[in-house]
């Protein structure tokens, strides 16, 4: 009989198997996707630590049916996994970034398979610096936008000066800048999507290990994604409700207008052009203005596209309410391999976390709190400041739930909420 799904003890699992079902809810595990291919030993060991048995889907994995059945029975089968590269061959991180098309922008240490950029500052120490860098960049962007409207070109040196403090802060500790951006969405103060996309682009690049020049390009490109809006009538940009069909037809023009502005400007790198020109293209060819698809979309264009889309999802506009960060992450997961490749979605979600720093979360026991920092080992178990008790009372002495406290607690994050839920103001704790 031809089997499609085989029950498997996790002690018999192997790299290359496709896991379709667990013996516990997916949200109780660190795995982003409901169904995934085991790609390296880290994922294999995580599965073994969380589950006793899983179900392996034969057709979707890289092993043969005979190999899977033999291993399910406890028989030894020699398999060379993706992370068992032959001497001189690149390992898992090297392959991921080259498949995404950003390999040539890796820093030297990443080419040697070393660790990510190190965190050199605490969130507490970095918080005022991140906030100052963000607010200064918001002001600078407004001036850059107005100067561009008048002159028809970008003052590149001014843009680089504006984004440099952002980059420096993100390199020291990205959690502080993430808190600044996500809290800013609900602070009641003017929110700059341009600065947010600049920040998210650099955070993504930092996660991928892109070198310092590449991070600067990401920051500049993120800030200038919609610079072509200087050519779109103000009444369309400031519309409080639905716009007419004729007005909607003018919106895609901002991409070409932005490219034209960059052509008239000095010292604009090709990668910045990629971000502006392709940030509305989609993996399945449904985007605009070129209708490009798949790997034909340049790497920086793919980074810009998912960053811009995610920030739009989580920002309130006249067209739609803001999604909670967790709901936006789930929506990105739902449209993977359609609007964005699965690999880009996965790496982006690893960058920001399923529950980004500064967001309000509710736990399975009814308590609630704020995410303080991401946990790079388990995205579903970040460091959380517990502010609300299961009874509904606020904690007079908030407790921090870190990676050690998660173990054996029997609780998990059940839901991510919008800022302001349960009367929790993230900026009160950030300051």
Image (cartoon, rainbow, N blue to C red):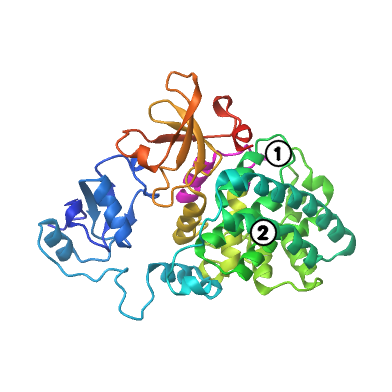
Q: Is residue 324 magenta?
A: yes
Mark 1 vs mark 2, foreground winner is 2
Locate residue 38: give its quadrant.
bottom left
Please give the label number shown on residue 222: 2
- Position of the C terminus, as image quadrant, is top right
Q: Residues within 10 Å of mark 1 (few under 14, many from 20)?
A: few
Query: Where in the figure is residue 138, as x and y percent of width and height?
Result: 75, 49
Secondary element type, mark 2: helix
- Magenta residue span: 312-336
Query: Where in the figure is residue 304, as x and y percent of width and height?
Result: 61, 60
Secondary element type, mark 1: loop
Q: Nearer the viewer, residue 211 or 121?
A: 121
Query: Where in the figure is residue 210, as x and y percent of width and height?
Result: 55, 67
Using the rendered image of the protein, determine whether residue 337 is visible from the camera's viewpoint.
no
Locate residue 206: give its quadrant.
bottom right
Q: Which residue, given by chain and number where applicable, does mark 1 sit on?
A: 318
Is the residue 63 above or below the residue 406 in the image?
below
Q: Residue shown at 29%/61% (left/top)? A: 41
Distance between the alpha carbons at the discs numbered 1 and 2: 22 Å
Q: Nearer the viewer, residue 381 or 250?
A: 381
- Position of the N terminus, as image quadrant, is bottom left
Q: Residues within 10 Å of mark 2 (few under 14, many from 20)?
A: many
Q: Residue shown at 36%/37% (left/top)? A: 405
Using the rendered image of the protein, determine whether residue 416 is visible from the camera's viewpoint.
yes
> Which label's residue is closer to the chain start, 1 or 2?
2
Going by the image, does 349 lie left or right of 87?
right
Q: Nearer the viewer, residue 308 or 204?
A: 204
Query: Where in the figure is residue 86, as x and y percent of width and height?
Result: 30, 78
Q: Residue shown at 67%/49% (left/top)? A: 129
Going by the image, does 84 lie left or right of 306?
left
Q: Is residue 345 magenta?
A: no
């Amino acid at each position: 009989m031809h089997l499609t799904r085989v029950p498997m003890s996790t002690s018999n699992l192997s790299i290359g198997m496709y896991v379709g079902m667990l013996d516990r809810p997916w949200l109780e595990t660190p795995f982003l996707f409901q169904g995934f291919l085991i790609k390296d030993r880290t994922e294999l060991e995580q599965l073994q630590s969380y589950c006793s048995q899983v179900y392996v889907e034969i057709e979707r994995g890289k092993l043969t049916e005979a190999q899977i059945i033999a291993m399910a029975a406890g028989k030894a089968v020699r398999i060379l996994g993706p992370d068992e590269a032959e001497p001189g061959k690149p390992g898992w991180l090297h392959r991921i970034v080259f498949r995404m098309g950003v390999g040539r922008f890796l820093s030297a240490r990443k080419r040697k398979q070393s660790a990510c950029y190190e965190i050199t500052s605490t969130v507490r120490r970095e918080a005022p610096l991140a906030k100052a860098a963000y607010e200064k960049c918001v002001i600078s962007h407004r001036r850059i936008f107005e100067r561009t409207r008048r002159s028809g070109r970008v003052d590149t040196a001014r843009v680089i000066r504006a984004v440099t403090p952002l980059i420096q802060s993100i390199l020291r500790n990205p959690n502080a800048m993430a808190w600044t951006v996500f809290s800013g969405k609900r602070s009641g103060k003017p929110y700059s999507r341009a600065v947010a996309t600049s920040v998210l682009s650099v955070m993504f690049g930092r996660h991928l290990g892109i070198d310092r020049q590449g991070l600067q390009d990401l920051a500049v490109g993120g800030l200038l994604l919609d610079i072509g809006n200087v050519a779109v009538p103000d009444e369309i940009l400031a519309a409080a409700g639905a716009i007419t069909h004729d007005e909607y037809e003018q919106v895609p023009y901002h991409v070409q207008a932005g490219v034209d502005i960059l052509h008239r400007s000095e010292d604009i790198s090709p990668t910045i052009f990629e971000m502006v020109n392709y940030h509305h293209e989609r993996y399945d060819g449904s985007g605009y203005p070129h209708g490009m698809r798949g790997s034909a979309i340049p790497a920086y264009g793919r980074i810009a596209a998912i960053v811009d889309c995610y920030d739009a999802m989580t920002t309130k506009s006249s067209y739609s309410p803001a999604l909670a960060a967790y709901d936006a992450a789930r929506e990105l997961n739902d449209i993977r391999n359609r609007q964005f490749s699965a690999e880009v979605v996965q790496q982006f979600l690893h960058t920001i976390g399923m529950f980004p720093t500064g967001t309000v979360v509710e736990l399975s026991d009814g308590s609630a709190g704020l995410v303080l920092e991401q946990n790079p080992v388990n995205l579903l178990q970040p460091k959380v400041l517990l502010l609300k008790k299961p009874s509904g009372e606020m904690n007079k002495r908030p407790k921090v739930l870190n990676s050690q406290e998660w173990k054996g607690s029997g609780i998990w994050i059940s839901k991510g909420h919008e800022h302001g839920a349960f009367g929790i103001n993230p900026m009160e704790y950030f300051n």
